[in-house]
Image (spheres, grey):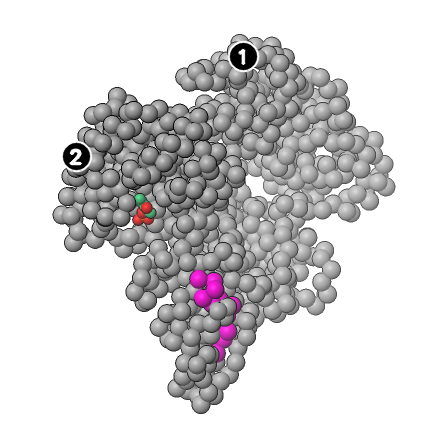
Amino acid sequence: MQINEIASMTGARLYGQSLRDIQWLLTDSRSLCFPESTLFFAIRTKSGDGHQYIQDLYDRGVRAFVVQHMPDTAMQSDATFLVVEDSLTALQRLAERKREEYDIPVIGITGSNGKTVVKEWLYQMLSPDYVVTRSPRSYNSQIGVPLSVWGLNERSQIAIFEAGISQRGEMEALQRIIQPTIGVFTGLGQAHQENFTTMQEKMSEKLKLFKDCPVVFGLDTTTPEDPLEHDRNLCVQVCRHLGMSQDVIDQRLANLEPIAMRLEVKTGRHGCTLINDTYNSDLNSLDIALDFMNRRPERDETRRVLILSDILQSGIDPSHLYTHVADLIQNRNIDQFIGVGSQLCAHQDCFAHISAQKTFYPDTTTLLDNLPIIYEARNAIILIKGARPFHFEHITSALEQKVHETILEVNLAAVRQNLDHYRTMLDPTTKIVCMVKADAYGAGAVEVSKLLQSQPQVGYLAVAVADEGALLRSHGITKPIMVMNPEMSSFQTLFEYNLEPEIYSFRILDALIHAAQHAGITDMPVHIKLDTGMHRLGFDPLTDISRLAHILKHQTALIPRSVFSHFVGSDDDQFDSFSAEQYRRYQIGAQDLQSHFSHHILRHIDNTAGIEHFPERQMDMVRLGLGLYGINPRNNQTLHNVTTLKTTILQIHDVPATETVGYSRRGQLTRPSRIAAIPIGYADGWDRHFGRGKAYCLVNGQKAPYTGNICMDVSMIDVTDIDCHEGDEVILFGAQLTPSELARIVDTIPYEILTSVSDRVKRVYYQE
Ligand SMILES: *Cc1c(COP(=O)(O)O)cnc(C)c1O
């Protein structure tokens, strides 16, 4: 569609170029894919305002925006703005117009449960005969439905859209957009009751979807006996209505696949097969998963294990609900049932009549502590199904067969939580410079920066050298990037990738001015470093400033964006008076520099420890490093663990007391020992000083000391007192054995432990 058509369809005022081909609608800036042909709707919701992301999207190449007011910056003269009263309404109107162009059967699905299942199954049944356009995943909201309808195209022969509402008045809008010609009502449960006073009210609101709909299918089922059967029946009715023969219906029913994105099959330990379904936990999806498990080609005698969490927000009375679960377990021939959660514990009696072996745990941690009970299940097939808050991914990972590799697991959610932790100590207006130098302290700068750049209050990312900045830019990082140690040879990279260097000496200042002038650069932001006591890099705040200001004022290539310094000991109270002196020197230098310029030069001095210890010195910005990565330099245990370095046991030897282990016979034994070899060595950045019994790792939660010298690629550990097997997981550092603890043992600092893990150790990212 052309942008001017969209303007007239939505009743918008158009500013800027009126011909632009729009193929994609965007409401969440993180989902941007094809900037040139995207139209961004800046929508205000309870949780945020899309108008804030316009500049960012512009920088990433988007040129078409639907807004409620024009942005302040004048620079966007080559962009098109459609100004409307309400961007969400405009999006919905556009979808309505789009829908009107299609004279095809449109199936509209609503109801309390099972909408996505019915939609997906209908799709599976209809797609051999029709080109079907359907809502992606569960796009059924006020925003999701218009985006789904936008997916209609000239090939569409039938469409399936689901509609979900959470309060009164919402269904009218969805009805106008979907305009179903075939209605499907999956039933009314207790779920999402909050915003409705009565069931009647909820019912009549939902039925508004079918206002002008000539035919509606639904079954009388407040709590269906067999939800899956119920969903199947709905699909059958729709297919019949569309003229599908009973033979074809039967054949396609038999081939219905469970909804794929929810179920993941993995190889577990001890010959087990894991079916992982942590997507959600309702009765429908439990039955889908059990059904899936039973249909796998395992031998009949294979033991079937179900690990299930409490089923949350089902809207069904718990004893009714869990009796139903128990029936499912019985009917689906489960041999062992493990229930996790307080509700399941409280309703154990619902399971009294089933023949499966049963155990109940109050929470996931307790189950993890008792995992050996599952290890006993050899060659079993294990279905792991939990509601999100139960974090069953920890169970999956504990049961998974580990490939023989050493990995650094990075919990990105923890990085965000740590950022939030430090934000609570800051004024909301103080900007944060996130230090992602040294590959984000080993955690991986690209992934960490992708996460950080969209977080509130983050003003800058900071790297050590220009190449690190270039790498971030090439991965789509658009935030301003500070380069702390620019080298003379890297100036072209700075220019090319829009990186902002730290300037610490007259020599580098002159060279950069010269290079920038030569490259025709003006107003390149730079950051002035003052040496207030570290005596590493920086200008002298007492003697250098007037000369520095003079040089800066007599050129136009560079512009001082910030002036900063760095504490030598903000982590340690014994240096408090020296920190105060540093701060005093800094203020003199910073004020002096500022007095020569009319624009405000940003000030910053606090690092991680400084934020916590000297929040009164936060000024315009702070520089947050170590704390982001879960280590508190002031030794408070308040942060979330981010990185876990882990590996697996390669081999175990029983070694007589008379033998030695490793090079130069340094691993002396005092008793007959079990020695395990693990694939990590000094070439992975593992400190040789850890060897000869000084440090240890964790095997099944117990301390296993390093025996003998650490080798280049392998280390040996003593597991004599630990019940473990080849293939078992070994934690080298993580939440239970922190980098700080290892650092203490070999007399270094956690920074060194984190940044030493070499590139050949694969980084694996997850978000809880
Ligand atoms: C690394 C660094 C920081 C971050 O220090 P943390 O102690 O990790 O917070 C701040 N400022 C400068 C100049 C740095 O080099």
The count of marks equals 2
Query: What span is in magenta?
Result: 675-685
The residue that mark 1 highlights is 16
Relative to residue 361, is residue 12 depicted above or below? above
Whether residue 581 is in magenta: the answer is no
The numbered disc on residue 588 is 2
**Is 584 left, or right, of 710 in this rendering?**
left
Where in the figure is residue 593, as x and y percent of width and height?
Answer: 22, 30
The answer to whether residue 711 is seen in the rendering is yes
Tag 2: residue type?
Ile
The answer to whether residue 457 is seen in the rendering is no
Looking at this view, is 492 or 173 the one in front? Answer: 492
Looking at this view, is 292 or 620 the one in front? Answer: 620
Where in the figure is residue 754, as x and y percent of width and height?
Answer: 39, 56
Quadrant occupied by the N terminus: top right
Quarter-of-image position of residue 616: top left
Q: Nearer the viewer, mark 2 or mark 1?
A: 2
SS state under label 2: helix
Tag 1: residue type?
Gly
**Is 538 left, or right, of 147 in this rendering?**
left
SS state under label 1: loop
Looking at the image, which residue is at 48% across and 69% down? 712
Whether residue 684 is in magenta: the answer is yes
Looking at the image, which residue is at 77% across and 35% down? 126
**Is 728 left, or right, of 578 in this rendering?**
right
Where in the figure is residue 51, as x and y percent of width and height?
Answer: 45, 23
The numbered disc on residue 716 is none
Looking at the image, which residue is at 74% across and 45% down? 256
